[in-house]
Amino acid sequence: MRVLRRLGAVTAGEPVLTTLIVAFVLLQLFAPRGWASLPALVDWQTVMTLAGLLILTRAVEYSGLLTWIAHRLVRHVHSERALALLLIALAAGLSMVVTNDVALFVVVPLMLSLHELTPLPLRRLVIVVALAVNAGSVLTPLGNPQNLFLWQLSGVSFGRFVAALAPLCATLMAMLFVLVALVFKSQPLDLSMDVEPHPVDRPLAGVAGVLFVAFVLLADAHHAGIALTGVAVGFLIWRARIVWKIDWLLLGIFVLMFIVLRSVAALPWIHALLGGLALDTPLRGYAAGAVLSQIISNVPAAIVLASFIHDWRALAFGVSVGGFGFAIGSLANLIAVRLARLRGMWLPFHLYSIPFWLLGGAAGGWLLSHF
């Protein structure tokens, strides 16, 4: 009973996990698959790469380096608009390297601590930072789970992936900088009281940085299993807490997501429906990714559509733009709002995010056709 209560508490706080479990049970009841066939539905290269990145980003987070850098940067800010521009640049830059979730766990608490020093337009800042991590994470395979999946699926090099997504990332960031310049004032700010020390574990930061580069190079060469083994064993011997404290639930959700969504996509009527949409042209594939993300979020949309859209760049463009619009488009949106702990966030969030999705969608379609 205690185990069941604990499981119930976990699923109650994780609606995505709850939905996946219910969907899995229904699939096994009405369209059952042999249990032995389920592991084959999982893209284990993507899962192993994600696991390694979770360990390394947790190590960087525990080192305190990111927090130290963030607080040092904001000390040079003297206006509300400059702070907003710095925060979105910081959030976007971090999301390119240590995933959009980790970027939020650095930047949103930073904003909350600065708000204690001087009044800030916190709701607007949280909204533009959520937009920033979605825009910045577009650039690299490390930025978000859907990019990681599509990178592994496509088989292209790290550099080629970045080059392919760079025009969209640059366009979305330019739009965001214009938005921030318009909605934030040049009102003076005094952040000189931000003098609290932020110690850095230099050995941990240094080792994590070196291993990060080595891990990406091995993953780029399609040796994610070797890279994960090295990173996991090394940290288990040296700093075991880092391995135990990664987001194991996220890994479980990702595995279950592959099983459920690929099972759903294989259902005859779903397969016929998606196949009938003729998603073999880049613009149709792009539109499908951008729209379906508004219904089931961009990571599931990428997994479902990957079997029907063979132009990986068009799909990457679509699910990247799909992170805007409705909050469900990207889990990063939900994390940002949850971290901020502010009431009345959803209406103002959508007042910014939906127009951004529409404009970004038009820009992404044009870029896909001309570059």
Image: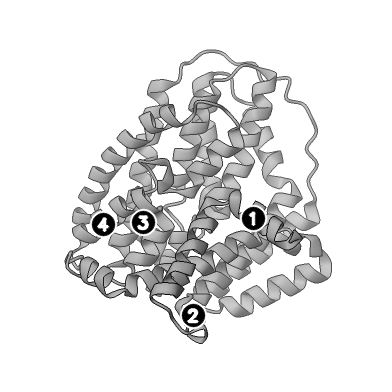
**Three-letter amino acid code at the position of disc 1:** Gly
Residue in the picture at 54% in, 36% down:
337
Residue in the picture at 52% in, 63% down:
21
First in sequence: mark 4 vs mark 1: 1
Q: Mark 4: few, some, or many residues within 10 Å (few <14, many ≥20)?
A: many
Asked where in the image residue 4 lies, by quadrant, the reply is bottom right
Q: Mark 3: few, some, or many residues within 10 Å (few <14, many ≥20)?
A: many
Q: Are marks 2 and 3 in contact (CB under 8 Å)?
A: no
First in sequence: mark 2 vs mark 1: 1
Q: Which residue is mark 4?
A: 288
The circle drawn on residue 38 is: 2
Asked where in the image residue 165 lies, by quadrant, the reply is bottom left
Q: Secondary structure at mark 1?
A: helix
179 lies above or below 35 = above
Q: Which residue is mark 1?
A: 8
Q: Secondary structure at mark 3?
A: helix
**Three-letter amino acid code at the position of disc 3:** Leu
Residue furthest front in the image = 1
Give the number of the mark in front: 2 or 3.
Answer: 2
Q: Secondary structure at mark 2?
A: helix
Task: Give the distance between the C-alpha atoms of the residues marked 2 and 3, in whole angstroms.
Answer: 32 Å
